[in-house]
Image (cartoon, rainbow, N blue to C red):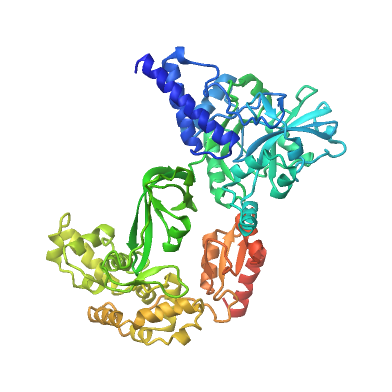
Amino acid sequence: MDLRRARKEVERLRAELARHDALYYREAAPEISDRDYDALVRELAELEAAFPELADDDSPTARVGSDSDARFPSRPHSHPMISLQNSYDLVDVAAFDRRVRRELATDAVLYSVEPKIDGVALAVRYEDGGLESALTRGDGKSGDVITSNAKEIQDIPHELPEGWRAHLPGGPSAIELRGEVFLTFSRLRRLNRERTAAGEAPLANPRNATAGTLKTLDASVVRARGLSVCFYQILALDVEPGLATRREEMAALDALGIPVNDFLRFAEDTDGLDAVLDELSGLRAELDYPIDGAVIKVDDLASHVRLGATAKAPRWGLAFKFAAEEAETELLDVTLQVGRTGVITPVAELAPVELAGTTVSRATLHNRDEIQRLDLRIGDTVRVAKGGDIIPKVLDVVLVRRPAEAVPVSWPMSCPACAGPIARAAGEAAYRCANPVCPAQVARRLRHFAGREACDIDGLGEKGVAQLLEAGLVADLPDIFRLRRDALAALPGWAEKSADALLKAVERAKDRPWEAKIFALGIPGVGVTTAAVLARAYPDAASLRAADTRRMSELPGLGEASAVGRIGAFLGDPRIADLLDELVAVGFLRDREVATAIRMPAADSWFAGKTFVMTGTLASGSRSEARKAIEALGGKVTGSVSRRTDALVAGENPGSKLEKARDLGVAVLSESDFLARLQAEGDEHGR
């Protein structure tokens, strides 16, 4: 690239970054993620390094973004209020550690680690114990004075406690506290419920809502919003600094009654830092406030002076950003999947985007109602998130970026796989294909049948099933037991050895426990736990087929009428009856089945038929163990709180689920209450 082209590109990048700065800092409506913004800054920095004559002290690479607002008076900061350098890779953390040790000429370095709250920075000054002023970050040198708004934040004291000077070396008369203002998730949900009821637009997200609230000219709005704040730094303004470490600094804040974050860890090396970062990342989903990473700082405050700072960032700290939980991308199409029970699920086909450490190109849309709620159109820019950091889903549409040619998503009148009729049962959101021999259902039913919790047929994964269907060797479940060695060995990529292995696995499936066979049938609404309940109540295929739904509804965990109705409809379908007859003929289903030792829950168990959600850390064991205990007693565990939840089990450091449970009036069990219930069940039923 020559100088002329480089100058043009530098000007374009600076203009683009200036636009994004305005959107983020002044309008609280960012269009791109921090990672994408930092990528633009890096691209600009590389060009400025390659062409030094294009460098400029006013470039985004040399200054802090500004949230200054002309409606508010400005005031210089006592000390520059600059941002930490962002890092997205553990390699950067290791490089930071090496540089710190090299510049301090020591191998004995201690680091503090705390959550990087995704809020708005604030500096609050106290003189003689009284709140004198509050400033935003501004441009790092000066900030907007928003004192009247800050006084409406309940967590910020107007007066420091009597004797506050005794907690600080040198007994200063003026200090400055720096922290992060934020809005909790539970508070945001409550506000949005109120706004929706009043016909107002909901607030987009916690960070944007916080920024907008702090810049309001009506202080009563701040009071109504219920913002929170955590402080992380004390600056003495009229005496020499006396605190020696970050640990002492946080302890002093706590002693003054100033709100601080309760997660503060220390590490001596990169291995320790990696462990703490993993711990915080694991807690992220349970927190009731937004964090986007961790703040790593050298613990020794004197070393901060020795390490110094650049124009943009201190050299004694680093912001480690977690993989993005949300991202924006283009909706390319909506395709429809037919599940093994006939449920038609729309799937968003997306332009590939990095999300929570993986590349995402598809996301669930749940059902037709969700498409209508989102008002999705092909060509839209959508926000995508990972539910529980696992399953991608579309959150909403970025309407300001909707192209004029965007096309509304249509819904089919028939099954996309077999062209058969589709319908939605009363009380259900899902549309289903009514044809149980629909090829798409058959393919998924075959994969389910061969799964580990079902028949455990190694070799019949997605690829294997697709090959058998394409070759015409199977059309439904009974055909698995009619496979021939020579036909299998002739398949591409197969041989006699792999054919023999599959046939042996198929033969072993005939001896699987009865509850595994029931689960393998793919009955709608029947998971592993329900299959075990049915296996104990109905000891063979004949009794299961003749099951009376009234009696079935009395079984533990099967009381919901819709669930029992789906099971009854499945077993009563003449085509399913033919399928079961064939499974008897091939030797899979037998007159007398063998079930593993199933400890059935008593019908009068307190847990039977109830739905539970868990949150926080359980000191007595893992959540997996608690889940098994609940399911063994006839209960069900789900991942989110709703009006159908019977009880929330809350361990240490519970997240936003606790607030939601209280809002909905759901019973909350402490860990000791939960364990007492388990013990009572054991005493009463001899377990």
Q: Is residue 229 visible?
A: yes
Decide if residue 603 is on the left or right side of residue 371.
right
Q: Quadrant of the C terminus?
A: bottom right
Quarter of image, res 577: bottom left
Image mark count: 0
Q: Residue at position x 29%, y 74% from top? A: 435
User: Observer-nearest residue: 70 or 52?
Assistant: 70
> In the orientation shown, which residue stands out farthest toward the top?
53
Residue 273: image x %, image y %?
55, 37
Pinpoint residue 82: horizontal percent, then vertical percent: 62, 27
Visible residue check, residue 105: no
- Which percent across, then down, holds residue 294? 57, 38
- The image quadrant where one finds the N terminus is top left
Q: Left or right: where does residue 138 sit relative to residue 602?
A: right
Q: Nearer the viewer, residue 643 or 264?
A: 643
Front position in the image: 519 or 197? 197
In the current view of this chain or complex, which residue is farthest to the front?
404
Q: Residue at x 47, y 55 (%)?
A: 374
| Residue at left offset 42%, top offset 74% | 425
- In the image, 110 versus 433, the foreground residue is 433
> Residue lying furthest right in this view?
162
Could you tell me residue 632's position as x and y percent? 51, 72
Q: 443 left or right of 530? A: left
